[in-house]
Amino acid sequence: MSAVLHLDDLRVPVETGGGSRKARLTIEADGSLRLRAAEDVATDELRQFLASKREWVYRKLAEKEVLQHEPVTKELVDGEGFLYLGRSYRLKLAEGAGAVRLDRGRLVLPSSLAPTGEAHLIAWYQRCGEMWLRPRVRSWAERLRVEPGVIEVADLGHRWGSANGGRRVRIHWATLQLSPQLVDYVVAHELAHLREAHHGPAFWQVLARAMPDYDERKRKLAQRGARLWFGGTL
């Protein structure tokens, strides 16, 4: 016996049978979903189970998207493009010392930093990102009625952000390459965790009240996030 359920706009075939009542959700190699459960598990129970797995599904699909694309690498040469808040800036190698900076529409890398240019560029994203994020975090925190603590920009692997019980909110530096609308989604998502730790229905209700179009932003993040630069130079 088989049926089909839906998670948002994702089609989820259901296979029934076996002795275990514990439902099992898998993501196939082609990105399709498959749900297995015992015959006596009610449809409403399966729908609730799917809803509880929503964030896991989108995170795994985003990771699969990343893995299916060649990693983005950059050359530290004049004219190479680097995204910041959705806009592309051309790299300019400049004589002398100093820090990485934006200057008249160019991302300037002083020649003294060139030997370790990648690390300095990432540090620039972290430094500028923390300054840009502070007022955005305050704004979204007010909407979500939470009080975050320390805000950090760091390398978080394949995670866009994290929040913990100590109210520390961390955002991946690569997130700052996205448009403000998508950075806001990551920020609001992590702040919502300060109210609801787990990705159950209550979490998504909290986020939806503050950001009614969060589903659309989440899909765009999965599509565009795989094509960002996460480090690596030629």
Image (cartoon, grey):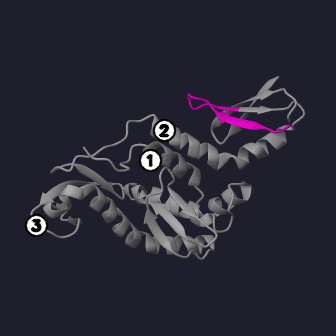
- Disc 1 vs disc 3: which is toward the camera? 3
Name which of mark 2 and mark 1 comes first in the sequence.
Answer: 2
Q: Residue at x 55, y 76 (%)?
A: 149
Q: Nearer the viewer, residue 157 or 68?
A: 157
The residue pinned by badge 3 equals 96
Distance between mark 2 and mark 3 Cα atoms = 40 Å
Instruction: State the quadrant of the C terminus.
Output: top left
Kindly identify which residue carries mark 1. Answer: 225
At mark 1, the secondary structure is helix
Check the picture and name the quadrant holding the N terminus: top right
Q: Amino acid at mark 1?
A: Gly
Closer mark to the observer between disc 2 and disc 3: 3
Q: Nearer the viewer, residue 160 or 207?
A: 160
Part of the protein shown in magenta: 21-34
User: Where in the figure is residue 127, as x and y percent of width and height?
Assistant: 35, 69
Q: Residues within 10 Å of mark 3 (few under 14, many from 20)?
A: few
Residue for point 72% across, 49% down: 52
Mark 2: amino acid:
Glu
* Residue located farthest toward the left when viewing the structure as drawn: 95
**Magenta stretch: includes residue 30:** yes
Residue farthest to the top? 1
Residue 65 numbered tag? 2
Would residue 154 be found to the left or right of residue 15 on screen?
Answer: left
Tag 3's secondary structure?
A: loop
Question: Is label 2 in a helix, a strand or a loop?
Answer: helix
Q: Which mark is residue 165?
A: none
Q: Which residue is at 60% across, 58% downward?
A: 212
